[in-house]
Image: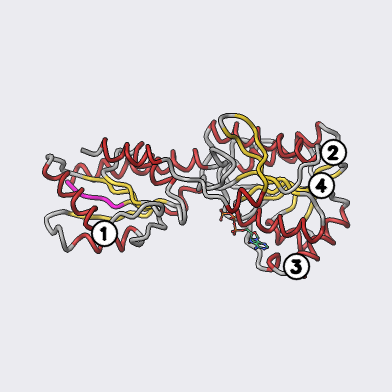
């Protein structure tokens, strides 16, 4: 393989830049030309592609976001769009790709390989930590630290005013961010899509806290919880416990930004090198991940389709520690 392309796709996550840097420098180290593709699959279709040098990735290891920009591409969902993307890659002589993104990006990459035979190795870049085949995804560690920083601040004000706060964190299908923030932030309750918590459970937990002399409480809600978002859940609870002063905060996109943590920089750097080495060694349609601190390659189909179950011990821990 003489020439590869790298792109970031889907929702951005802190550490994507460290991964891009690692891909570029690892490829150059192996004597391979490397092209940056901007705006994910959109840039691939439009030919927004440039040759990268070592200096192209100077001073980015510590920066959040992605210098390659990211996008969601409707056109790539069509056969014609993917054909255009292939033509652009062919023009530049790009023979393999490193995709840094989530399950949607890997689904697209898989279809692209089946249609045009360009091998792709994926690096899991998403704050959700929801990909099977890696214990951690790039950005998750930073995101929970960012969320915790905000939760700590909310605790101060909740405590001063004897309030209950419902705090919504990201996680449409996955409670990883919520459960980790719940434990680290000392929450009374965590509501995640993977388990069903009734409104009665919420009311009982808050009443129990009050009976145990708690003057303030924190409930962490993953945005994809089956009871609704934090505002909806707080609304359902309010009427039943009028004595509680309930407030709601949605942390939102703040969780996606910021300088990557040491953990994410190191993970991203390891995975970037492993992705390039994987391509060189003939890997195709796999996601590179870290399992038990070892680099492993998992077929895209498996990484996309298999659920990464939430650790039930963590849920139990919240229950034990909230009394
Ligand atoms: P995140 O987990 O942060 O949302 P993601 O990679 O899952 O990241 P998506 O928006 O789901 O983000 O997917 C990124 C892009 O991948 C889409 O905009 C689309 O261009 C491409 N893609 C997703 N699914 C398909 C598909 N079935 N066929 C072709 N392309 C796809």
**How far apart are labels 2 and 3 at the CA level?**
27 Å
Left-right relation of 211 to 181: left
For label 4, the SS is strand
Instruction: Please give the residue where the numbered disc 1 appears in the rendered image.
Output: 234
256 left or right, relative to 229: right
Helix, strand or loop status at disc 3: helix
Q: Can you see residue 55?
A: no
Q: Which residue is mark 3?
A: 81
Residue at label 2?
A: 32
Horizontal arrangement in the rendering, residue 113 relative to residue 293 (left or right): right
Please state the horizontal and vertical placement of residue 136, each as a whole percent of the image.
54, 39
Q: Quadrant of ligand 1?
A: bottom right
Q: Is mark 2 within 8 Å of ligand 1?
A: no
Q: Say which mark, if any, is on residue 59.
A: none
Label 1 element class: helix
Occupied quadrant, residue 282: top right
Name which of mark 3 and mark 4 comes first in the sequence.
4
Foreground residue among 38 and 121? 121
Dot placed on the residue nearer the N-terminal end, 1 or 2: 2
Instruction: Give the extent of the magenta segment.
Output: 162-166
- Please state the horizontal and vertical placement of residue 140, each as a whole percent of the image: 51, 42
Whether label 1 touches label 3, CB < 8 Å: no
Q: Earlier in the sequence, mark 1 or mark 3?
A: 3
Q: Secondary structure at mark 2?
A: loop
Residue 51: image tag? 4
Q: Nearer the viewer, mark 2 or mark 4?
A: 2
């Amino acid at each position: 393989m003489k020439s590869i392309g790298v792109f970031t796709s889907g929702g951005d996550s802190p550490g994507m830049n460290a991964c891009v840097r690692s891909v570029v420098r690892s490829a150059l180290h192996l004597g391979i030309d490397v092209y940056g593709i901007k705006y994910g699959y959109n840039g691939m279709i439009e030919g927004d592609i440039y040759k990268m040098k070592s200096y192209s990735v100077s001073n980015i290891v510590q920066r959040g976001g992605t210098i390659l920009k990211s996008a969601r591409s409707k056109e790539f969902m069509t056969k014609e769009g993917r054909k255009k993307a292939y033509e652009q890659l062919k023009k530049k002589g790009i023979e393999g790709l490193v995709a840094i993104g989530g399950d949607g990006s890997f689904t697209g990459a898989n279809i692209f390989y089946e249609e045009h035979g360009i091998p792709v190795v994926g690096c899991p870049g998403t704050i959700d930590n929801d990909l099977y085949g890696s214990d951690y995804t790039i950005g998750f560690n930073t995101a929970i630290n960012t969320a915790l920083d905000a939760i700590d601040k909310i605790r101060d004000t909740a405590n001063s005013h004897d309030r209950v706060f419902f705090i919504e964190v990201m996680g449409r299908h996955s409670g990883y961010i919520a459960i980790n923030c719940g434990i680290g932030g000392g929450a009374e309750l965590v509501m995640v899509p993977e388990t069903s918590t009734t409104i009665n459970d919420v009311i009982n937990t808050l009443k129990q806290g009050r009976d145990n002399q708690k003057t303030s409480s924190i409930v962490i809600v993953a945005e994809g919880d089956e009871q609704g978002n934090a505002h909806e859940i707080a609304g359902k609870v309010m009427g039943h416990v009028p004595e509680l002063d309930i407030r709601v905060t949605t942390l939102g996109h703040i969780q996606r930004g910021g300088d990557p943590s040491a953990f994410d920089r190191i993970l991203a750097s390891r995975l970037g090198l492993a992705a390039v080495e994987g391509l060189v060694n003939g890997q195709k349609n796999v996601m590179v991940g870290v399992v038990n601190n070892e680099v492993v390659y998992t077929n895209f189909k498996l990484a996309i389709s298999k659920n990464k179950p939430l650790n039930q011990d963590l849920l139990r821990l919240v229950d034990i520690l909230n009394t």
